[in-house]
Image: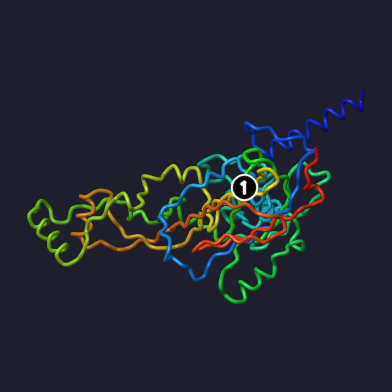
């Protein structure tokens, strides 16, 4: 009886672990004994000399929905600052004569429940991380016993020579280099994997690209000339005749109020962020990548209406504001295992290699 109870207990634990890794979908995963495991290595880099001659990109980001997607990096990177916190001494109780010692931690601080708007709640661990490390050194694992994908140690990476050459020649800036082992299923069965890297812009910019501290950019201007409409019209005509263009089509310029939902659903803003989906059609591997590369730029201040644009023009307030623009990447390709595949983009480069393991062959 004890052995049956133990078996049921272990089965439940395994089921809960798999459910935590893979979101519930319409198509159930096959039995673990039939999973086909592959090793995936990805190198992401930013082009230093961008070619914009053949492709135009919109300023605002194309939202890539990363909710409920498999994410290696959040837990990996979150554990790093938590390890530092655990090394601090526990804060002593304060009395009226003592000052707060910031180099300490509170009891069970990691277990506090964050409440929205609570100024005393600990911030998300990744919010304070200025940038991610380029090379991700995973703990590894055993595909014969693993119930979920896992990161591979850095000493198993095979694209180091490409990364080193890019750095030495100055052609590109590596953003992310990692490898993991995962089971690969038919299209739509397994999860997509979220990857993010580079500079953390979360403290300075919203996901929509607008700066958090530039309130003046979206504030309406007061009318400068009172009710002298005739004078305003004459000035506007003079501006137009001089070659100035005081009026801009609103549909082509990002507007903060149009993208508030983007900011609510995406509190963290990374230089590189998106999803990679690896699946099988028959025995052919496919890679589907969808990413955004963010880059600091500037955006001309324009009003949210024709009236505001006229007021800005009359006030001579056509200054630029800092803006975090986006370069969207979306490519799908059928690939062959153990070959190196390069996904080209005017601003971004992604190198992928999928390698077979001892459990890659179909097992029926």
Question: In the rendered view, does 295 fall on the left or right side of 110?
Answer: left
- The location of residue 147, given as percent across then percent down, is 77, 41
Q: Relative to residue 255, is residue 353 depicted above or below?
A: below
Q: Residue at x 52, y 40 (%)?
A: 116
Quarter of the figure with the N terminus: top right
- The location of residue 291, given as percent across then percent down, is 54, 53
Q: How many marks?
A: 1
Q: Relative to residue 254, is residue 54 depicted above or below?
A: below
- Image quadrant where residue 228 sits: bottom left
Q: Residue at x 40, y 55 (%)?
A: 58
Question: Closest to the observer: 331 or 238?
Answer: 331
Quarter of the figure with the C terminus: top right
- Note whether residue 131 is visible: no
Task: Provide the residue designation for mark 1.
Answer: 277
Q: Secondary structure at mark 1?
A: strand
Residue at the far top: name it: 1
Residue at the far bottom: name it: 169
Question: Closest to the observer: 37 or 175?
Answer: 37
Q: How is the image coloured?
A: rainbow
Q: Residue at x 22, y 61 (%)?
A: 245
- The location of residue 174, given as percent across then percent down, is 60, 66
- Note whether residue 132 is visible: yes
Question: In the rendered view, does 302 fall on the left or right side of 128?
Answer: left
Question: In the rendered view, does 18 fall on the left or right side of 255?
Answer: right
Question: Closest to the observer: 88 or 200?
Answer: 200
- Image quadrant where residue 177 sits: bottom right
Question: Closest to the observer: 101 or 33?
Answer: 33
Q: Residues within 10 Å of mark 1 (few under 14, many from 20)?
A: some
- The location of residue 348, given as percent across then percent down, is 53, 62
């Amino acid at each position: 009886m004890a052995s049956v109870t133990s078996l049921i207990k272990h089965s439940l634990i395994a089921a809960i672990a798999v459910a935590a890794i893979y979101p519930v979908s319409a198509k159930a995963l096959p039995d673990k004994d039939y999973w086909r495991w592959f090793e995936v290595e990805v190198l992401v880099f930013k082009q230093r000399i961008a070619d914009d001659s053949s492709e135009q990109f919109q300023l605002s980001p194309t939202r890539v929905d990363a909710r409920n997607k498999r994410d290696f990096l959040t837990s990996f990177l979150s554990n790093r600052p938590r390890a530092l916190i655990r090394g601090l001494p526990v804060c002593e109780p304060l009395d009226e004569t003592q000052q707060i010692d910031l180099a300490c931690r509170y009891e069970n601080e990691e277990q506090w429940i964050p409440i929205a708007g609570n100024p005393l709640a600990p911030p998300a661990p990744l919010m304070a991380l200025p940038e991610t490390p380029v090379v991700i050194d995973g703990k590894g694992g055993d595909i014969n016993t693993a119930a979920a994908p896992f990161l591979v140690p850095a000493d198993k990476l095979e694209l180091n020579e490409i990364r080193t050459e890019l750095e030495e020649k100055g052609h590109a800036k590596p953003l992310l280099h990692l490898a993991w082992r995962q089971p690969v299923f038919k299209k739509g069965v397994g999860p997509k994997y979220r990857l993010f890297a580079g500079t953390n812009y979360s403290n300075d910019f919203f996901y929509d690209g607008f700066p958090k501290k530039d309130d003046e950019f979206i504030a309406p201007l007061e009318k400068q000339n009172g009710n002298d409409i005739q004078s305003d019209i004459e000035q506007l005509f003079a501006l137009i005749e001089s070659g100035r263009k005081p009026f801009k089509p609103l549909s082509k310029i990002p507007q903060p109020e149009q993208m508030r939902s983007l900011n609510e659903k995406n509190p963290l803003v990374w230089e590189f962020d998106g999803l990679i989906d690896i699946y099988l059609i028959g025995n052919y591997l496919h890679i589907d990548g969808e990413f955004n590369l963010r880059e600091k730029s500037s955006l001309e201040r324009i009003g949210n209406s024709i009236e505001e644009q006229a007021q800005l023009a009359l006030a001579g307030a056509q200054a630029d504001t800092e803006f975090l623009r986006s370069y969207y990447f979306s490519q799908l390709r059928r690939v062959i295992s153990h070959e190196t595949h390069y996904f080209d983009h005017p601003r971004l480069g992604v190198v992928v290699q999928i390698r077979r393991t001892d459990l890659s062959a179909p097992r029926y």
